[in-house]
Image (cartoon, helix red, strand yellow):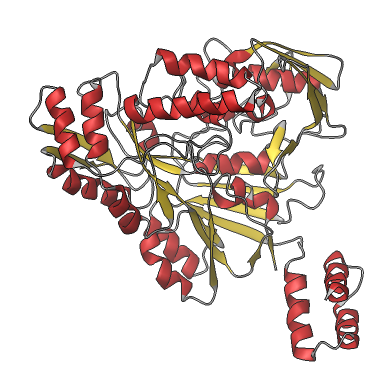
Amino acid sequence: MNKLGDLERLLRAGHIDRRQFLAGAAALGVGAAAAGTLAGQALAATPKRGGKLRLGIGHGSTTDSLDPATFENGYMALLNFAINNHIAEINSEGELVPEVAASWEASDDAKTWYFKVRQGVEFHNGKTVDADDIVASVNHHRGADSKSAAKPLLEQVVDIKADGKDTVVVELSGGNADFPFVIGDYHVAILPSKDGKVDAMSGVGTGGYILESFEPGVRASFKRNPNYFKAGAAHFDEVEMLSVTDVAARTNALITGEIDTMDRVDIKTLALMKRNENIKIAETTGTAHYTIPMRTDQGPFDNNHVRMALKHALDREALLQTVLRGHGAVGNDHPISTSNRYHASDLEQRTYDPDKAKFHLKKAGLTELTVPLHAADAAFAGAVDAAVLYREHAADANINIEVVREPNDGYWSNVWMNKPWCMCYWGGRPTEDWMFSTAYAEGASWNDTFWKHERFNKLLVEARAELNEAKRRDMYGEMQLILRDEGGVVVPLFNNYVFAMSKKVQHGTLQGNWDMDGTKCIERWWFA
């Protein structure tokens, strides 16, 4: 079998052709039919260049912009990874590896980091990437007026400077063993600079595709970058991304061949789609989760007993089976998944308990509660159904949830972080520090619960500098406990990423760190 495996590898690498493979397989005693099947599988697994990939994406808004600091949804994340690169990336094996950086190293206390710039990387306008571009790209998110989601992540940066053309030196306020993850945040795209500034709206990056057109909330088109520095990537000649927020329309477009792939499959139609011989379904597990954030700076959610009552008033198991049909896991009111390194597995799982919900209502001085919950399927497929189910569960706790259905378009700019209580989703983050710093640290741009907790914020700073594994685990465990019992978020479910594609679309091992193969499908996939 090893010799047969060698033949398959030679065929995939192009060192032998199909006829030579069949002859070699026959010599090993493999029947003609089986050898033909193996040859077909091997050739399908070999990336090929060419064709136009058309994506139907369940995100996108007319308020989207090309400034990486503003990226807030899956559509712009895909566009970002098509046209831009970052200092580091999660590769197809799930490891953090250098991207525009060639390498990095830290001082012994992890307070000073040195990044070497990869040689020969060009922007789409022909400019060669140097250290000044990286410094300006990072500083774009650090200004006093910056509203970037990466701003709180980079507040630990005391100084960043170029040391010649090929080295960037970063000084931190405290040690951070995970800093390459932080500076590799997807907002921190490497852009061309002039006089220390970047033109964030130019759409010019170093990515595998050059942006040709962009109509926010509608479509974007790209052509392959002929000078892309990565070997074995960016296989399509052209790409077109359509924003199709209605899941039924997205599904129909895939079935009728108007698009080649779609994200966020409606689980309710999964069995029907599997019967279609021209479509295949993909599913990955990672850190993605659904949330129901409450604004803790507004009543009645400024009272923790109200928050606790609402957390106990939801039947998560019923939601898992009804909304996700089992394609995920129940949440415990914090965002750290079982795939994270410091997941607190010993933390008691919150369960549906109307009596406990009533107990907390009483502590809040209430016998009943009426609250509006804003929902749209833009938040996640089935979000409106989930809100309706929540209303039914909560009724037994004397809680009247008024479900307010919102339009999909503009949901992220008009509802999320504006309405006191709404449905939401998060892709999650690969490290605890990254997740907490983005969404739960005081003052974070995307702290959608507007939560402030002195002990939590203190632990956040101390844990990132703690190099003792056991102490660090204890700190992150305590932070999950604090969030579960005092935070402003209900985390009912961790959802698997479920997406679909035409059978002519091929790919390697799929990554679950983000949706659609780590949101790098445009760079990684190819046509058979």
Q: Is residue 234 shown left or right of residue 376?
A: right
Q: Is residue 299 shown left or right of residue 28?
A: left
As drawn, 202 above or below 499 = above
Residue 251: % across, % down: 43, 63
Q: Is residue 208 visible?
A: yes
Q: Is residue 365 shown left or right of residue 512?
A: left
Residue 137: % across, % down: 68, 22
Quadrant in which the N terminus appears: bottom right
Spot the residue most to the left.
367
Front residue of 103/501: it is 103
Residue 68: % across, % down: 58, 30
Q: Is residue 245 shown left or right of residue 57?
A: left
Residue 471: % across, % down: 58, 23
Front residue of 276/201: it is 276
Picture residue at 53% right of the left edge, 51% below the top = 285
Front residue of 94/67: it is 94
Q: Quadrant of residue 236?
A: bottom right
Picture residue at 21% right of the left edge, 27% below the top = 306
Picture residue at 52% right of the left edge, 26% below the top = 474
Front residue of 348/275: it is 348
Q: Is residue 67 visible?
A: no
